[in-house]
Amino acid sequence: MTLRVVIADDQALVRAGFRMILTADGIDVVGEAENGAEAIEAVRRTRPDVVLMDIRMPTVDGIEATRRILVGDAPPRVIMLTTFDLDNYVYAALGLGASGFLLKDVTPEYLVAAIRIVRDGDALLAPSITRRLVERFTTPEPRESPLHRDLAALTPREREVMTLVAQGLSNVEIAGRLFLSEATVKTHVARVLAKLGLRDRVQAVVVAYESRLVTPS
């Protein structure tokens, strides 16, 4: 099944470069947009699997476009495009449900791999990078997360797993820490996401920090 992508960036050269890389690898670029309003329309019209979304665009920026896209029915995965890895706009996008971010100078190989990873339902960011981002932009005082869910719905083991995810541990590392199989850890992570209504482990990290389950180091 062909992987379908929409590219939203206000720079024509960026769109052309990404399109050339993706089509050379058999990925179908079904739409392009130079601002957020066009991106929303392109997604509605083409129903892509993944959207590459620039953060800073005229008319409607990438944050607002992402918000509108992800509240729709069967929304695509969204990868944010940015120039800076620790960007407060990226943090806002992750809170809305974006599956990760890419720097615009990403290598062709990593761009293709990232899109395929996200299409398959995994989060793009390494947990350690997500943690750095969240630690920088969360407030020092407890507050209700815009993604707040009742953590009381989690079992003690699920809270423990969520805490370790937020601390940057991979499933393999969590399995070693808790003396569990990797398959069991994956099951716990899936249950955490389902109970809290989260799209992926990126959002789980955001919720863990903003609900103060984990505090910035």
Image (cartoon, helix red, strand yellow):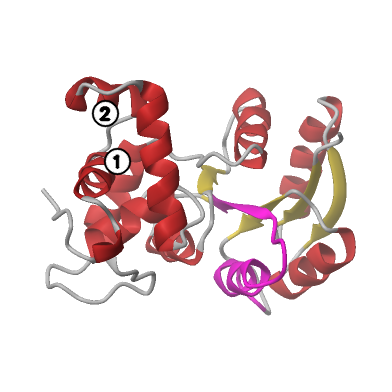
Report the side of 130 relative to 107 (left or right).
Answer: left
Using the image, tell me which numbered label, if any, was put on residue 165. Answer: 1
The foreground one among 3 and 19 is: 3
Which percent across, then down, holds residue 6? 78, 53
Q: Residues within 10 Å of mark 1 (few under 14, many from 20)?
A: many
Residue 79: in magenta span:
yes
Residue labelled with disc 2: 174
Which percent across, then down, holds residue 189? 39, 42
Which percent across, then down, holds residue 7? 75, 52
Q: Secondary structure at mark 1?
A: helix
Q: Which residues are magenta?
A: 60-81
Residue 101: in magenta span:
no
Which percent across, then down, holds residue 190? 45, 44
Name the residue at 36% across, 40% down. 188
What quarter of the picture does the N terminus occupy?
Answer: top right
**Residue 201 in sight:** no
Mark 1–mark 2 CB contact (< 8 Å): yes
> How far is the residue under mark 1 from the one under mark 2?
8 Å
Report the side of 123 relative to 70 (left or right).
Answer: left
Identify the mark nearer the N-term, 1 or 2: 1
